[in-house]
Amino acid sequence: MINYYELLKLDMNAAHDEINDAIKIETERNTIPEDQIRTMKSIFFNTEFKKEYDQRLMQFLLTSTESKKSGDTIISSINAEKISNLFNGISETNENAVHDKFIYIALGLTALNVIISSFASITFANISNLIFSVAIIVFLLKDWNVLNNFGKATFSKWWALFLPVYLYKRAKRLETKQKYFQIWLAFFVLWIIVFFTFIGSKSLLESSACDVVTDIVHNQFHQRNVSCESVTILESNGKSHDAIATLSNGNTVGASITELASGDIYVEIEQ
């Protein structure tokens, strides 16, 4: 049985950071075979595996009278199937294993936030955006804790405040493709397209409503010297919109705009 503590020149009471630093040093020196380095990381960076390894090593040191054999391995004694799953990136139910479930949730919330922000009313969109942003940060922090338990959280957890940066740094640390960052980028581009499409249609609606307001002021209020300068939509609920109209005399009036099935609009203003 190989005593990995001895290879790292550490005792069994060494802290997680000491073990991590020692592995980095030996990796740079290239004094320990790469396969043994991988095995050490799998054992020491997983709480369950390390605990079982320590118990078996202590028993071995206390009872064994045989000399060490350089070709021994501990993989089979601490569950070879779990070690294989870790090497292959297969998710374990153990929270210490690296998995992507929190990233899936964060991206799902991002997609939902894009949809709501694009089509909901301004007030509701702002509220939902705040709620989704907090939820996304919470799940990213959970993911960071998983990486930390597995010894791979070498970047600050505060990058969880910035989803795209977190996804990029995570992939770099795990040496995987930037697929999650690319998914976020696709969401962002889609949101930009939808946003500007919505802004364009909104501006056209406001311009048309302003013309109608001018007609109302001239024909119903009989104020020929007053016209509408601008209309600003404040709240939307489907085809109905609450707005405010600014007149040439400096006054502002409330207005309601309804989009009709024929393509025309119906405008009412407060007297």
Image (tube, rainbow, N blue to C red):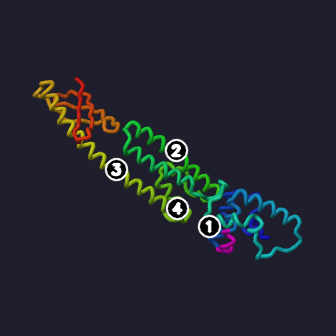
For label 3, the SS is: helix
Residue 230 on image: x %, y %: 21, 36
Closer to the eye: label 2 or 4: 2
Res 190 label: none
Residue 135 badge? 2
Residue kind at label 3, given as amino acid type:
Val
> Which residue shows up at 33% across the image and 35% down it?
235
Q: Is 9 a magenta residue?
A: no
Q: What residue lies at 80% left-to-right and 75% top-to-bottom? A: 69
Front-most of residues 49 and 40: 49
Residue 81: x and y in percent read: 70, 66
Q: Is residue 159 above or below residue 219?
A: below
- Looking at numbered disc 4 in the image, what kind of residue is underneath it? Ala
For the residue pair 154 and 48, the one nearer the viewer reads as 48
The residue singled out by tag 3 in the image is 194
Q: CA distance from mark 1 to mark 3?
A: 39 Å
Amino acid type assigned to the residue bearing label 1 in the image: Asn
CA gap, disc 2 to disc 4? Answer: 21 Å
The stretch of residues the image draws in magenta is 30-38
Task: Look at the numbered discs 4 and 3 and tell me whether their residues touch, using CB distance below 8 Å.
Answer: no
Tell me the element at label 4: helix
Exactly how many numbered labels are in the figure?
A: 4
**4 or 3: mark nearer the eye:** 3
- Marks 3 and 2 sit apart, C-alpha to C-alpha, by 23 Å
- Residues at marks 1 and 3 touching, judged by CB atoms closer than 8 Å: no
First in sequence, mark 3 or 2: give its number.
2
Disc 1 element: loop
Mark 1 or 4: the one toward you: 1
Name the residue that disc number 1 marks: 88
Distance of label 2 from label 1 (alpha carbons): 30 Å
